[in-house]
Image (tube, rainbow, N blue to C red):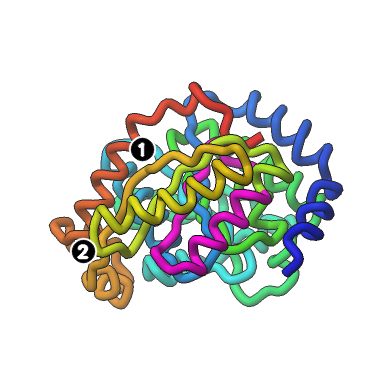
Amino acid sequence: MDQARVLREMKEIDREFYGMNLKSRQKKRNKGVRVIAITSGKGGVGKTNIAANFAYIFSKMGERVLLLDADTGLANIDVILGITPQYSLFHVLHGEKILSEVTVQGPGGIMILPAASGIQEMAELSRSQKLALLEELDGLSENLDFMFIDTAAGIAENVMYFNMIAREIIIVASPEPTSLTDAYALIKLLHNGYSAKRFMLLVNMVAGPNEAKEVYRRLNSATDHFLNLFVDYLGYILCDKTVHEAVKQQSILVEFSPNSRASKCLFTVAEKLCQERPEDYGCGI
């Protein structure tokens, strides 16, 4: 893929929409809600599982949490959690339902906003659909403390859109070289094309802290050198076969095996995320 060409095209597409429109809505949105996008350049790095576990952890802490499945074309949060929602974002964007009518309750009391799977038109939302969804999300956010957005992987237009809704962006990467390369490409597009200024890196499926820090060092070195951008290190999650067992059982890992290696890492990262002060930075637009 010609990343330079994609970047030029994205800079020209809906600049006003992503600039003025989303910025004005962020100012109007309930200041108490934290909207966090969990995203990745490459698929298969555990992004969706991480999003679901974070949502569960914060909900069990007494926070009002919404988990938005933003992989609108190939949704799978419902599969991971073993739920079968009757309606999805597809019905909202076609005017058949409103968001509150398609939202379902998941493990730990988290509210889940399911997306559609296998519907091609949902893979690329239209401008009018994006505007309608923003209006609906603004209404929902008034009664929330946290909204976790599980985006699709890659650099498609939908991925850009859902990242720019958020004020905080967590990039999930693994030690694989392709994951690191794709993470850099995603950061580059969000930074150069949409003026995203702050990113947090979460390294998944590592053997230990040293491997995670090396992944971070390599990514941050690239963003610092080529983009003049510093990436924050959020933490790491250890390789753990229990993760696959929980997925097979369609269970939340931290509920399925709270004392597992990966669960302990998730709790540690969640605690660090709690201590973040989003009002101190301008992540997103």
Please report the bounds of the magenta region as a residue range: 164-189
Q: In the image, is residue 275 above or below residue 4?
A: above
Query: Is 216 on the left or on the right of 123, as rendered?
Result: left
Residue at horizontal 60%, vertical 68%? 116
Name the one closer to the observer, 165 or 119.
Answer: 165
Among the 4 quarters of the image, the one containing residue 50: bottom left
Q: Which amino acid type is shown beneath numbered disc 1?
A: Leu
Q: Which corner quadrant holds the C terminus?
A: top right
Does the stretch in magenta take in 157?
Answer: no
Query: Is 192 on the left or on the right of 35, as rendered?
Result: right
Q: Position of residue 180 (x, y in %)?
A: 49, 61
Q: Position of residue 225 (x, y in %)?
A: 58, 44
Mark 1, mark 2: which one is toward the viewer?
1
Q: In the image, is residue 18 above or below residue 123?
A: above
Q: Is residue 145 visible?
A: yes
Residue at horizontal 33%, vertical 43%? 59
Q: What residue is pinned by disc 1?
A: 273
Query: Is 4 on the left or on the right of 227, as rendered?
Result: right
Dot label at residue 12: none
Q: Which corner quadrant holds the N terminus?
A: bottom right
Q: Position of residue 164 (x, y in %)?
A: 64, 43
Dot label at residue 256: 2
Name the one closer to the observer, 59 or 23.
Answer: 23
